[in-house]
Image (cartoon, helix red, strand yellow):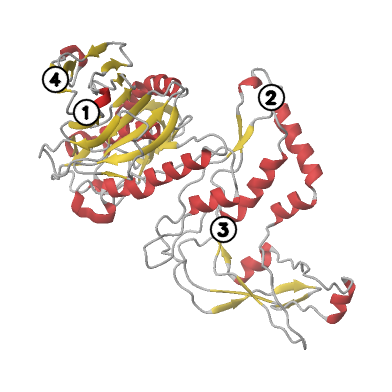
Amino acid sequence: MEFYGHAGDKHTFGEKKAVLLSQKGNQDSRKLFTVADYRKLGSPTEFFDLHLNISYNDLRASGLMTDDLDNNPNTSPHWWWYVLRHFAPGLYWYGNSDVSLDYIEFEDEIHRKLRLNTAAYKKGINARIQEHMDLPNGRIIKHMYSMDEPFQTQLASFRKMQSLIEPGKPSLLAASYDVDHREFRQNKKGDFWEFQALTRAIAEPRDIMPDIYPIQPRVHYEPYAGEYFLQNVIDHQLTKYYRDSKEYSLENGKFYPIVQTFGYWNGQRWYSWTLPPKATQKALLMLPFCYGADGQYHYQLQGAVNSANNSGYLAPLVGIDSKKIEHNPYTYDVVKELNPRILQIGTELKSWEWLGASTVMIRSNYPELELSKTPIRKLRVKQACNGLYEGYIETGLYQNAKGETAIFAVNRRSNYFVYGRKHKHPDFTPLEQYDNAYKEFAPQTLIIELDPAHRNATVLDHETGKSYSAKNGKYQCPCSRRREAAEDCEVRVEASSRACMRPDVASTFMRQDVASTLMLQDEASTI
């Protein structure tokens, strides 16, 4: 058996590199398995496991395990991570018979210890959890957090640790992000390898916690940007993973998405992550409700900035030079405003069953929702010709034990970018220019066409408790930007029902013969 790899980055294979194994004072790239070794195993006649150990030092010495993440010797090595690239075993068989391999399994030291000393680790893990629970107010602990964002080699260890926790104790949680998102195409159909799918398949978390941060450099707010158009990014990077995670959680446990509330400014431009503009931030905070989230976390709550060059993580709260904490009003005010309402909405939706979610456009919605068990016939966005593009209203469908139906809707058409002398590109626009650079789209109208059997619906505003009854096939409801300055908007129930929403978010409950509506922010969404 020979252990080797190849030089190169994650997309290229370079020259072959052998791993020199330290053995009895000698170094060799090959490990021999002889007839004598076979006999020592008892001469098995069926498949058997052959264990070969490689030290991390040998891997590092060969250059296959390295802290040079970008494969550039002129940049600084990573302070925390090592990457293992293009590692492959090669088997050379010299016997006068056939040999077949059932599988080749890579196992790191942590997993090996968990597997071989299961009883000891189970005792230690549960004793440590109990110590936390025995602390004053320890009863509030609902989950235990393991290593943050485990990589592929750690997923099986997560599953093993999860299985060792005794019933009745807090379950294990770990955030899982979209490693190498859309980097590796798997086939000609355009399917990509997905780390999120790998996490569900290998780690098998009881409660799933995706941390997807879609607002990054290269994201554009105009539809001609193609793959990097904001709405396309939300489709393939956020809502797809939300849908997959929710469907997984229906048979396993809870769905706790982590919502982006931060960006990293390096003093000259946004790097890795861009701070979301206000209306987009509101939409991100509300989107999990379209996918039946059981709760949500914000990341980050507190960032850190170096005042010397004004670089660092901007979040609702910001630590300045590790000396004082200030709030960043731009993001802080949005989170402070929405969090109480998120709690209220989440509490209400706990008693409703999630049925599915869809993105509503002018002439269609995708994916198609199963509406046969609801009073809804069709969902559409009313064409208004009032912006660079229209549509992209995300809708989540719910039903309760009484058979009543609810809709939660979020207007994803949030911000557009205004190019100017001090804000020439989203990647280079500092926070102090955000109010000038990012503007909100005009409100859109969501058309909810009802089945004729439910034409006499009554609308109930969930937050205010106010109801609106249909009279002569129509009813009046407030539909303004601000509740205190509400004006009436007429809706014909027998033909369709319309929800007038702000660019950020609106939500609607609709029951079989009584439709209830949640008004979010300063705008009412109405049926």
- The residue tagged with tag 2: helix, strand or loop? helix
- Between circles 4 and 3, the one closer to the viewer is 4
Q: Amino acid at mark 2?
A: Met
**Distance of label 2 from label 1 (alpha carbons):** 44 Å
Residue assigned mark 2: 133
What is the crowding at mark 3: few (fewer than 14 residues within 10 Å), some, or many (at least 20)?
some
Vertical placement of 509 versus 219: above or below? above
Residue assigned mark 4: 489
* Mark 4 or mark 3, earlier in chain: 3
- From this viewpoint, is residue 395 visible? yes
Residue assigned mark 3: 82
- The residue tagged with tag 4: helix, strand or loop? strand
Q: Amino acid at mark 3?
A: Tyr
Q: List x then y, in percent, for residue 510.
A: 32, 23
- The residue tagged with tag 1: helix, strand or loop? loop
**Distance of label 1 from label 4 (alpha carbons):** 14 Å
Specify the quadrant that holds the N terminus: bottom right
What is the crowding at mark 1: few (fewer than 14 residues within 10 Å), some, or many (at least 20)?
many
Q: Amino acid at mark 4?
A: Cys
Which residue is most to the front?
453
**Distance of label 1 from label 3 (alpha carbons):** 46 Å
